[in-house]
């Protein structure tokens, strides 16, 4: 009985194997086709839904209206100002927060005393969503750029700190022993082994921090400012310019997508031995 | 201390005759959750300059621990270890080590991995690269000089690890089951390579393995260790002709030697088994 079922299974498996190659090729082509259709299909349906009268066109404008709003935004010159204001906040915050995160990650990862001193504090502060700091940031910094920077730095710092800390701790002990046996002085161990060993972790942390810096940018600009992509979205909302709101969202999505892709490409070069 | 006080000619004489490695009454105790475990119990042995000694024993018998201690990597121990006449306090340039895993620096090419030791000892980049290229030729990996470790097979990686350890021209080379992670075919090739390499370098070698065949093929002397606590059961001289290769494993002299070793190991295994049964 058992033999019979196993033989049947084997036959079924073999038949499966024969068809699998042609099947997977066909499926692959189908997937590419569907993938290419995804966006146009979505935009088309959106256009139809908006214009069908089933929804309020003012609240749910079709893509053509959104596109027109975006064009107007660019033509007026405001877009460039908003874009540069937002990008400046994100990049400065990312660089400052990232640098501090790497520095403290190395310190806590490498020196147990520093870790005992700082890690409990960091672990308590880390889970607080950066957005929750908006009220107190307004009290401390008013509407100044320093407050915006603070929020982005705060968001980026803990992610980068934790991944660097873990990276430093996870450096292969075997590599350190090998380096010791080859005569690497202990004071050179950081630059020769630890930093490079932790690099893959640091890069992952930095990449996660890219999207976090955009989250915190939203909070920072909603807290009150005078230029920026999210600021423009908020203003447009107050004026019932729904097309502009959606255009702003699309711009924000696009920028953060491009930033992530750029960083991924950069990361591949940073960890050059993979 | 006595050595330093002795008159000059005698000192030179004794330096010439002194063993490359002297281990006397080495004991190593580990702190575990259940209290202290004696990993190594009063182990003593000498290794003559240029000698190839294999330490065999079951896993957990402390053979790797002994090796790490000679390397200066295992800190707390009792007893005395002298390498080239001077006590071991930590890793030192005249002692090289090859581990079970290659532990190559993944971010360095083969050449730069091998050049690492000389660089750390103050050689210029050019000098270090010359040393590295010589060794790369010796291990037959010229085509892979600029390759990164993750593109090499396990056997090739371990060859690079050996070359990297040799780059500092150590007087003593310690090898901790270096071929343990390789498949049988690769291991046989690596053993032959090591025998060839050994004729060209002028180092004393201590090689740890749990494979009795590997030990007899390679060594001038085999130290058989017992487990829990680690002790040396037998010191077996391997008087097989050199140059050797792994093909020696079918010779009658080889086989009788292997039988002697296996008898010792079997008797010890039975004793340990009965003991654990009784308790």
Image (cartoon, coloured by chain):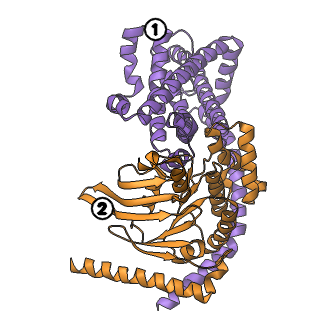
Residue B38 has which mark? 2
| Residue at image coords 45%, 36% | A165
The chain that appears purple in the image is A
**Position of residue B128 measured from the top left corner of the image (x, y, whole percent):** 71, 42
Q: Is residue B120 above or below residue B82?
A: above
| Residue B146 visible (yes or no) | no
Q: Is residue B151 above or below residue B197?
A: above
**Position of residue B225 measured from the top left corner of the image (x, y, whole percent):** 41, 71
Mark 2 — on which chain does it sit? Answer: B
Which is nearer the eye, A202 or B256?
B256
**Position of residue A56 measured from the top left corner of the image (x, y, whole percent):** 54, 27
Query: In the shown orientation, is residue A98 left or right of residue B65?
Result: right
| Residue A83 visible (yes or no) | yes
Dot 1: what SS? loop
| Residue at image coords 65%, 24% | A65
The chain that appears orange in the image is B
Which is nearer the eye, B17 or B102?
B17
Q: Is residue A210 above or below residue B70?
A: above
* Residue on which disc 1 sits: A143
């Amino acid at each position: 009985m058992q033999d019979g079922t196993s033989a049947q299974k084997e036959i079924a498996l073999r038949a499966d194997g024969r068809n699998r190659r042609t099947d997977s090729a066909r499926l692959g082509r189908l997937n590419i086709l569907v993938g290419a259709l995804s966006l146009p299909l979505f935009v088309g349906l959106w256009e139809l839904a908006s214009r069908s009268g089933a929804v309020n066109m003012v609240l749910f404008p079709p893509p053509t209206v959104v596109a027109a709003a975006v064009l107007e935004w660019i033509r007026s010159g405001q877009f460039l100002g908003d874009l540069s204001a937002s990008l400046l906040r994100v990049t400065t915050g990312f660089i400052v927060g990232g640098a501090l995160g790497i520095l403290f990650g190395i310190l806590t990862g490498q020196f147990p005393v520093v870790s005992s001193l700082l890690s409990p504090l960091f672990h308590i502060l880390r889970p607080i969503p950066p957005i929750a700091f908006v009220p107190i940031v307004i009290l401390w910094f008013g509407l100044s750029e320093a407050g915006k920077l603070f929020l982005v730095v705060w968001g980026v710092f803990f992610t980068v700190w934790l991944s660097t800390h873990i990276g430093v701790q996870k450096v292969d002990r075997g590599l350190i022993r090998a380096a010791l046996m080859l005569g690497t002085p202990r004071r050179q161990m950081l630059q020769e082994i630890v930093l490079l060993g932790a690099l893959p972790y640091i890069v992952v942390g930095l990449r996660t921090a890219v999207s976090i810096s955009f989250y915190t940018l939203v909070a920072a600009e909603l807290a009150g400012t005078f230029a920026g992509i999210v600021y423009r979205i908020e203003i447009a909302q107050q004026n019932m310019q729904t097309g502009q709101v959606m255009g702003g969202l699309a711009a924000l999505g696009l920028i953060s997508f491009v930033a992530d892709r750029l960083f991924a490409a950069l990361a591949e070069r940073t960890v050059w031995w993979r | 201390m006595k050595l330093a006080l002795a008159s000059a000619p005698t000192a030179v004489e004794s330096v010439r005759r002194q063993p490359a490695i002297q281990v006397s009454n080495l004991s190593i105790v580990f702190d575990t959750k259940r209290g202290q475990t004696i990993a190594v119990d009063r182990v003593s042995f000498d290794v003559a300059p240029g000698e190839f000694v294999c330490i065999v024993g079951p896993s957990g018998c402390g053979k790797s621990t002994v090796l790490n201690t000679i390397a200066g990597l295992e800190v707390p121990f009792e007893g005395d270890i002298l390498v080239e006449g001077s006590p071991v306090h930590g890793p030192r340039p005249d002692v090289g080590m090859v581990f079970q895993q290659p532990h190559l620096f993944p971010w360095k090419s083969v050449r730069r991995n091998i050049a690492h030791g000389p660089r750390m000892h103050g050689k210029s980049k050019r000098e270090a690269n010359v040393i590295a290229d010589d060794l790369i030729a010796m291990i037959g990996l010229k085509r892979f000089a600029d390759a990164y470790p993750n593109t090499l097979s396990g056997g090739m990686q371990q060859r690079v690890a050996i070359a990297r350890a040799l780059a500092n021209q150590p007087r003593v080379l310690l090898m901790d089951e270096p071929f343990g992670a390789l498949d049988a075919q690769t291991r046989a090739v690596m053993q032959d390579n090591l025998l060839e390499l050994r004729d060209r370098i002028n180092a004393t070698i201590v090689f740890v393995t749990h494979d009795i065949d590997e030990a007899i093929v390679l060594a001038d002397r085999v130290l058989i260790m017992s487990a829990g606590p680690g002790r040396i059961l037998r010191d077996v001289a391997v008087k097989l002709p050199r140059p050797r290769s792994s093909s020696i494993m079918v010779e009658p002299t080889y086989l009788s030697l292997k039988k002697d070793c296996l008898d010792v190991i079997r008797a010890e295994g039975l004793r340990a088994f009965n003991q654990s049964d009784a308790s």
